[in-house]
Structures are given as C-alpha cells and as structure tokens.
Amino acid sequence: MAVSDEQLIRWLLHSDQRIRSASLDLLSSSYCSSPEILKNVQEVWNREGVEAAFRDFPLISHLSIPAEKVGEILARAAQMIAGRKLTDRVCRCAGKLLEALSVERASTFAPHLEAIRSLKQESKIFFRVPIESMELRAAALERQASSLHLDFEDGQPADIVIALESLWERGEADRWIERGMQAWINSSVGSASASPLAVAVLELVSRHSIRGYEESLMELVDRDEASVADLATIGLVRGRNPQTQQLIAERFAKMSRSGQLRSLDLIRRMRLPQSSELVRFLLPYGVDITVQNGARSAEVMLFDFKLLEDWLEAFLLLDETSVQRLEYAIPIVLPLAQEVSASDWPRIKSLLLMRLGRGFEIEYSV
C-alpha cells in the first residue's frame, strides 16, 4: 500500500525538516483535506519557527483551512506580516495562508470578509487574494436558488461560475454539472469555444472534491488541449475515487503519450490502495521510454514498502534526471523504513547512496 495520509500527517512533526517538507508536499499534491495538516503545520511553526519549519511552504499547491480555524489563521497572518518585507519568508507564508483560504468554499470565508479585506489592504503580499471575487461568491450564498438559475440563461461566464458553485454548496447543482460534463463529451472543441457552463463545471470539479463524474473526466484526461486535460486530471485527483484506477487500467493502452503521463501522475498523487500494483501492470503498455520511466517515477513516489523489492527495482532503473528530480522526497524512506521494514534498512540505504551519492545525508540508522 502507498504511504498513507496518516503517516505523512504524523511526519509533519518530524525532527528532520527534509521529512517534514516532503510529507507536506505529498499531502498537498493529493489535495488531502484533513484538519490535522493545518494543526501540525502550526505546531511546527511554533516549535521550529516559520523560517525553518518547511523548506518551500509558499510553493505548496493546497492547504485545507477548516471553517472553525479561519479567525485564528487571519490573526496569525496579521502577526506574520507585521514589520516584514514582502520578500521575507515569513511574510510569504502569510500570503500562502490567505491564498489557501480564498479557494475554500465560500461559506468558509464569508463570515470573515471584512477582516480579510482589511488584512489585504495592510500588505501587498496578499495581491493574489481575489477579494472582489470572494465577495461575489459570498453574496451568492444569500441569493434565492431561482435567481441563481437565471444566470445560466442570461448571465456572463463569471456569473455562471459563481451561481454553479453556490448551488453546489447547497447540494442543488447536479443537473447543471451533468449538463456541463455532457457538453464536453459531445464536443471535441477546447475551452476557448466550449459553452460557459461546460467551462464552469470543469473549473468547479478542479477546485472541490466532487465524485460521480469519473468516466467523463477520464475522457478529458486524454484531450489534446492541455488546459482541459490538466483540469480534468486535477478533478480526478481531488476526488480520489478508487474507480478512477479501474478506468485507467481499462483505457491506458489506447491513450496518447500525454494521456498516459497524466494517468500515471493521477495514480501517483491519489496514493490509493493497489496503486503500486496498477503502475507495474501499466508499465509495459507505455508508448515509449519516457512513459515507462514515468511509471517508475510514479512507483517510487508511492513509497509502497509492502512491495519493497518492486520499489527498489523501480528506483534502481530510474534515469538520472528523474532521480535528481525526486530527490527532495526521498528522505521519507527514513521514517517509513523504521515503521515498515527496519530489517531491510541496510539494503535500502545502500541503494540510496549508490544512486544519490555519498553527499546524501542520512542522519540516523534503523
């Protein structure tokens, strides 16, 4: 089984910054929404200081902020920017907190808009916080459903996006999502000429965890237009539905090179049971050596030490460029080996040093 959310969340508190940072990166890339992530991030900030806690915190792609923590987060962000330059690491981390909040459900940030607006005015670090859009999304929560439905008939594309999200929060968007997804399936056109509803639906499923549309999204993963295929891929990662793996297994051999690479990225980021077995199954069907190397990269990043021999083989066969690209995550093998396969540590350590060089520091033994 791939390294789990529970393990990675626990390792956010590890004494080694490399392990903390790699754990946060894997959780972020999977769009994990556990409230324990923010709790542990804050605990490490308190213990180690923001500068030393995580290597590249401002670069993570996702951080879930529970509604009950918004007030606390705003207060913390205000403290973090006080008297600091925009380029200061602590200030940049404060910016990430508000960016993360801005993409949450509108109901999460709506009660705090005044405080968010005030904080945005205090520092230019919050330039990526779309306060006007957030205000419109919050206002839509107060509108009648009948009023929102009218936006699908005569509203601008931006109005449709907001109306769809507001209806989704109320559990009343299914028929609109189905219409939008069907519009994609019925057409081969890209987003530039697709219907506004289709575009809005794809944006919605890429921003929130929404299940039930896996088959339609898998069709889009193999589209030529990268912007469409990438959003569909993100939507499937957010859903983390085991059905997605079955769909990949059925369609992989007939996919284009880009579709195969996105599918492998999907498997890697979802980190579901049987992910490693699926990657091994798909490897021979890769259309070229790049895809096959992508399969090995995915297997390495799953860190499935229940299948240690396969993991070691994948790491051994990776090309040098991939080894260097994945090096940031490799420290995860340290606590993983302790928990899963302590007796195998000498072999694991030997392979790491052979591929990464003696300069790769291993600070403790198992």
Image (tube, helix red, strand yellow):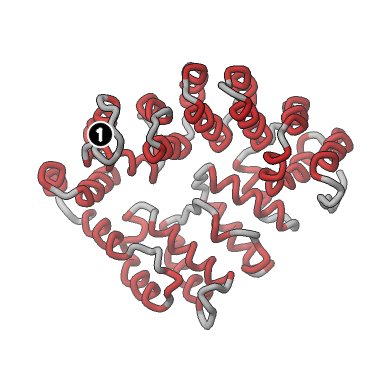
- The image shows residue 359 at horizontal and vertical percentages of 84, 52
Residue at image point 39% right, 46% down = 207
Q: Secondary structure at mark 1?
A: helix
Vertical placement of 152 versus 62: above or below? above
The C terminus - image quarter: top right
Q: Is residue 278 above or below residue 321?
A: above
Does residue 216 appear left or right of residue 267 in this picture? left
Q: Residue at x 74, y 29 (%)?
A: 317
- Report the label total: 1
Residue 325: image location, x then y, percent: 66, 45
Image location (x, y in percent) of residue 58: 54, 61
Residue 262 can be seen in this image: yes
Question: In the rendered view, would you say 111 is above or below 107?
Answer: below
Looking at the image, residue 330 lies above or below residue 16: above
Residue at figure coordinates x 35%, y 66% from the top left: 112
The residue nearer to you, when weighing 359 against 182, is: 359
Which residue: 34% across, 62% down?
130
Q: Please name the residue that numbered disc 1 is placed on.
A: 180
The amino acid type found where label 1 is placed reads Gly
Query: In the shown orientation, is residue 335 left or right of residue 283?
Result: right
Q: Residues within 10 Å of mark 1 (few under 14, many from 20)?
A: many
